Image (cartoon, grey):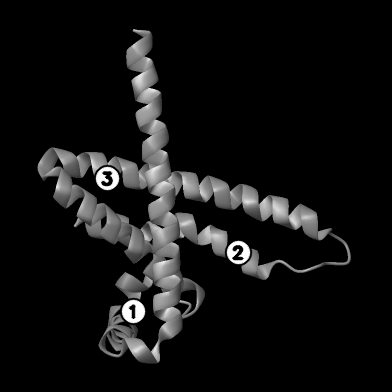
Amino acid sequence: MVFVVWLSFLPNASYIITDIFHLKQQKVIPLWFDLLLVISFAVNGMLLFFLSINDMHRLLLIRVSRRVTWLVTILVLFLSGFGIYLGRFLRWNSWDVISNPQLLLVDIIERIKDPLSHPRTWGVTIGFGILFLLGYLLLNVIQSNYQEKSVIKR
């Protein structure tokens, strides 16, 4: 149950990156300022997103095999991409899992049953899924290198 709640709200951290869509030149505030502001929030959101996934990855390693843990982690990364699609393009919110589950489920099932009618769904899901996977792998490489250097210094 805790895993489902965590997964329902996880895409909110990475969703901030899509706020770049809202950027436009204003008369009073320069575009570069808005860009810096959105990027600073997006980087922070992405960092928290990856750290949260890393925490769950470690918890799973205690309970299941390394292979299963990686399969679940990769699935979560792509489900987060799907969550971004649901929020950005269909305008669903995390709390709709509780407040409006039937209609949310209808939208999800419709896209699964007829994927060719919803190319944007799968483009966004796969695109963000790959972005998140590459980011998470990069975090793991950095973490491994840091741990190796710590061991060498001792």
Question: In the depicted view, which residue is nearer to us: 86 or 144?
Answer: 144
- Kindly identify the residue that appears in the image at 41 percent across and 79 percent down: 121
Q: Quadrant of residue 72?
A: bottom left
* Closer to viewer: mark 1 or mark 2: 2
Query: CA gap, disc 1 to disc 2?
Result: 24 Å
Say if 154 sits above or below 50 in the image. above
Disc 3 marks a residue whose amino acid type is Met
Which residue is label 3 attached to?
A: 56
Which residue is label 2 attached to?
A: 19
- Kindly identify the residue that appears in the image at 38 percent across and 36 percent down: 141
Which type of secondary structure does the marked residue at label 1 adopt? Answer: loop
- Kindly identify the residue that appears in the image at 63 percent across and 63 percent down: 20
On screen, residue 147 versus residue 42, left or right, reads: left
- Which quadrant of the figure contains the N terminus? bottom left
Which residue is label 1 attached to?
A: 100
Tell me whether the residue at label 1 lies in contact with that at label 2, contact meaning CB atoms closer than 8 angstroms. Answer: no
Question: In the depicted view, which residue is nearer to us: 23 or 140?
Answer: 140
- Residue 12: x and y in percent read 45, 59
Mark 1 Cα-neighbour bin, 10 Å: few <14, some 14–19, many ≥20: few
